[in-house]
Image (cartoon, rainbow, N blue to C red):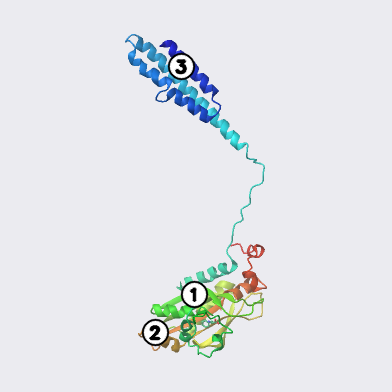
Amino acid sequence: MREELTALREQALRDIAGAADLSSLELVRVAITGRSGGLTRAGEQMRHLSKEERPEIGKLLHEVRTAILGALEVRGAELSAAAEEAELSQIDPTLPGVARTVGSLHPLQHLQRRAVEIFRRMGFSLAEGPDIETEWHCFDALNTPPDHPARNDQDTFYLPDGRLLRTHTSSVQIRTMERETPPIRIIAPGAAYRRDEVDATHLAQFTQMEGLYVDEGVTLGDLKGTLEFFFRELFGSDTKVRFRPHFFPFTEPSYEIDVRAAALGGGERWLELAGCGMVDPAVFAQINDRRGDKAFDPDKVTGFAFGFGLERLAMILYGVPDIRMFVENDQRFLGQFVS
Ligand code: PHE
């Protein structure tokens, strides 16, 4: 038995040393320590020894086992270190790294988020509506008569089924009032569509932002205060805001808003930036008819609405000379608005 154990150790150590890689070492390990391996069988034979022989052979078996397991471990570590080194040698650490470009918000998105954030601070929440609208939501409910030029199919994209691509986000006012009751304080950014010839200041699709506030006792003073605050937050505290009488079918009185600020190319020029007004009672009447209640009783509630185009605002604010740059996806342009 003693000779067998010595021979087992020698053979095992030779095989272990001779294993050229981790998978051959694994085969060697199984052949020695596996269920029918040499070491395992030697252990089983211990039972057949006499009481006298057992302590000495047992001790030897223990030494042999320790030597073999130790050798397996050492060789395993050597081989995996070698394997790792071989793998690393495939990599050239002197090569330059792959530069990852970090994206940035589209300038219109950036501006929209800034605008929404300012209105949120005044308690406005976000509202949405579909881009494909009914004539009722886009025009009739907004008190726009059938012969109004905006409804002309020269100006509006009509679908074959009679629906249309909304020409303004004012349709979201209507959808919100159909669904909710006063007090309503919403801001609705989104796409609007008009059949404009595309040039440096026109696209057939652009972005508008609509606001609506309806409650008891909402006044023209609230409208002016809200929009003055908004434009001062956006353009700086030196901003001057002017309300010029205008006409919209759905507001009475109506105004165009002109703004002057150093941030807007400085100085003396008034820039026309938005439309606004007090919600026309005729709009509330349409909503009540539709709802079948008097939730928007013109004798009780008043409201204001406003709307502006984000492209125009962004062009002035960021000095963008051509509106088409917003849709061309030129990285050299978009990369300048890192935010
Ligand atoms: N919807 C108008 C437009 O597209 C803007 C506007 C909105 C005017 C709300 C008054 C009130 O020009």
Q: How crowded is mark 2: few (under 14 residues within 10 Å), some or many (20 or more)?
A: few
- Read off the residue under disc 3: 8
Q: What element carries label 2?
A: helix
Look at the numbered discs 1 and 2 and tell me whether their residues touch, using CB distance below 8 Å: no
Q: Which amino acid does label 2 sit on?
A: Arg
Q: Which residue occupies 40% across, 80% down? A: 178
- Read off the residue under disc 1: 188
Q: In the visual, does 249 lie left or right of 289?
A: right
Label 3 and label 1: CA atoms lie apart by 84 Å
- Comparing 50 with 298, the one in front is 50
Q: Which of marks 1 and 2 is in front?
A: 2
Q: What residue type is labelled 1?
A: Ala
Q: Residue furthest top?
A: 52
Q: Tell me the quarter of the picture where residue 296 sits.
A: bottom left
- Can residue 236 be seen from the camera position used here? no
Q: What residue type is labelled 3?
A: Leu
Relative vertical location of residue 336 with respect to residue 45 in this rendering, above or below: below
| Residue 108: % across, % down | 58, 69
- Read off the residue under disc 2: 290
Label located before the other in sequence (1 or 2): 1
Q: Is mark 1 on a helix, strand or loop?
A: strand
Label 1 and label 2: CA atoms lie apart by 21 Å
Relative vertical location of residue 119 with respect to residue 276 in this rendering, above or below: above
Q: How crowded is mark 3: few (under 14 residues within 10 Å), some or many (20 or more)?
A: some
Say if disc 1 is inside 8 Å of ligand 1: no
Relative vertical location of residue 213 with respect to residue 29 in this rendering, above or below: below
Q: Nearer the viewer, mark 2 or mark 3?
A: 3
| Residue 160: % across, % down | 51, 80
Q: Which residue lies furthest to the front in this view?
A: 160
Q: Which residue occupies 61% across, 72% down? A: 314
